[in-house]
Image (cartoon, rainbow, N blue to C red):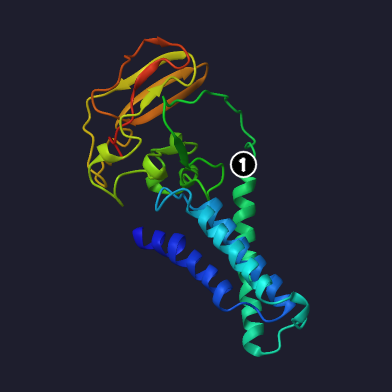
């Protein structure tokens, strides 16, 4: 997983911007194709990748580098001096690569943007469940390209069958100093993550149907695959049950049968379960 993040979220964007800056297309059609292809893929990566690592604002840096590379090219040479089409086979190959990047980036970007639309399901409008702080959604889009939880809807896969309730789950991470999720790349101590210990509040009024709070918080990346919810609260609102999972040990502040109002304190974010 770490290798994939480094390749797709560091090496690839830098390579795309390096291609623009060091090997700019030498034809007008190539200039347009190269700009569109690299821009589309950078946009697609920005929308699809989670960006909990390295840091959430890195796509903005890549976008600024893309713009700077295009501007520098325009300042160095007028587009009117360029031939309309590529003049060499190598240049044509570069144009073909740019078109492939445009198709791939366009597909990913379009899927991610489409996921911002509400799905064709009953929608529950709930309040923010976090106390003070800054948080981003890691997985929460209604399509599998962005939200891996949706894969559990496929009940033909044995390991998904016990967990259909998490298919529409959303993961969050907190933002600390400089927008980092933790102090370090992937520290073991859960307490150094920005979201650990954050207050969890009731996102709606309802009744508590389950509350578990004695399970331990694990060092990263350890987990409890037998008790995947970890410490949790299940809140019933009408015919719907909302699960807040992976809570901090001994932080759960409610018991089954309690009635809560919107934004009543439920406990704290932890690293229990899986």
Residue at image point 67% right, 81% down: 26
Number of labels in the image equals: 1
Q: Is residue 162 above or below residue 81?
A: above
**Which residue is more in the foreground, 155 or 140?**
140
Give left or right: position of 12 versus 112.
left
Q: Residue shown at 49%/53% (left/top)? A: 49
Q: Quadrant of residue 258?
A: top left
Residue 241 in the image: state x and y as whole percent.
Answer: 46, 23
Q: Secondary structure at mark 1?
A: loop
On the image, the x and y values in percent for residue 149 come to 46, 43
Which quadrant of the rendered structure holds the C terminus?
Answer: top left
- Image height of 48 relative to 166, above or below: below
Please state if 137 lies on the left or on the right of 105 as rendered.
left
Give the side of residue 84 with respect to residue 208, left or right: right
Q: Position of residue 48 (x, y in %)?
A: 53, 52
Q: Quadrant of residue 180?
A: top left
| Position of residue 121 measured from the top left corner of the image (x, y, whole percent) | 61, 32
Left or right position of 194 against 220: right
Q: Characterize the local packing of mark 1: few (<14), some (14-19) or many (20 or more) Cα atoms within 10 angstroms.
A: few
Q: In the picture shown, does residue 107 fall above or below 120? A: below
Q: Quadrant of the N terminus?
A: bottom left
Front residue (pair 266, 87): 87
Residue at x 61% of width, y 28% of height = 122
According to the picture, the residue beneath numbered tag 1 turns out to be 116
156 or 244: nearer the eye? 244
């Amino acid at each position: 997983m770490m290798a994939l993040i480094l390749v797709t979220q560091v090496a690839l964007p830098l390579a795309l911007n390096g291609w623009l800056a060091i090997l700019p297309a030498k034809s007008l059609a190539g200039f347009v194709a190269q700009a569109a292809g690299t821009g589309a893929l950078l946009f697609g990566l920005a929308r699809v990748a989670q960006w909990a690592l390295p840091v959430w604002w890195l796509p903005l840096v890549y976008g600024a580098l893309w713009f700077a590379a295009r501007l520098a090219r325009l300042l160095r040479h007028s587009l009117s001096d360029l031939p309309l089409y590529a003049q060499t086979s190598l240049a044509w190959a570069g144009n073909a690569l740019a078109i492939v990047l445009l198709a791939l980036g366009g597909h990913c970007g379009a899927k991610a943007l489409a996921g911002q639309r509400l799905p064709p399901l009953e929608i529950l409008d709930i309040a923010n469940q976090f106390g003070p702080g800054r948080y981003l959604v890691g997985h929460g889009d209604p399509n599998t390209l962005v939200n891996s939880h949706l894969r559990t809807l496929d009940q033909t896969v044995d390991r998904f069958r016990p967990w259909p309730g998490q298919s529409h789950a959303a993961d969050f991470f907190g933002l600390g100093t400089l927008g980092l999720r933790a102090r370090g790349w992937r520290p073991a101590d859960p307490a150094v993550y920005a979201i650990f210990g954050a207050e969890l509040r009731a996102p709606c009024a309802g009744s508590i149907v389950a509350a578990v709070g004695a399970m331990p918080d694990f060092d990263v990346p350890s987990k409890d695959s037998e008790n995947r919810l970890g410490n949790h609260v299940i809140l019933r609102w009408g015919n719907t049950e909302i699960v807040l999972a992976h809570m901090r040990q001994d932080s759960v502040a409610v018991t089954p049968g309690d009635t809560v109002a919107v934004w009543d304190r439920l406990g704290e974010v932890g690293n229990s379960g899986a």
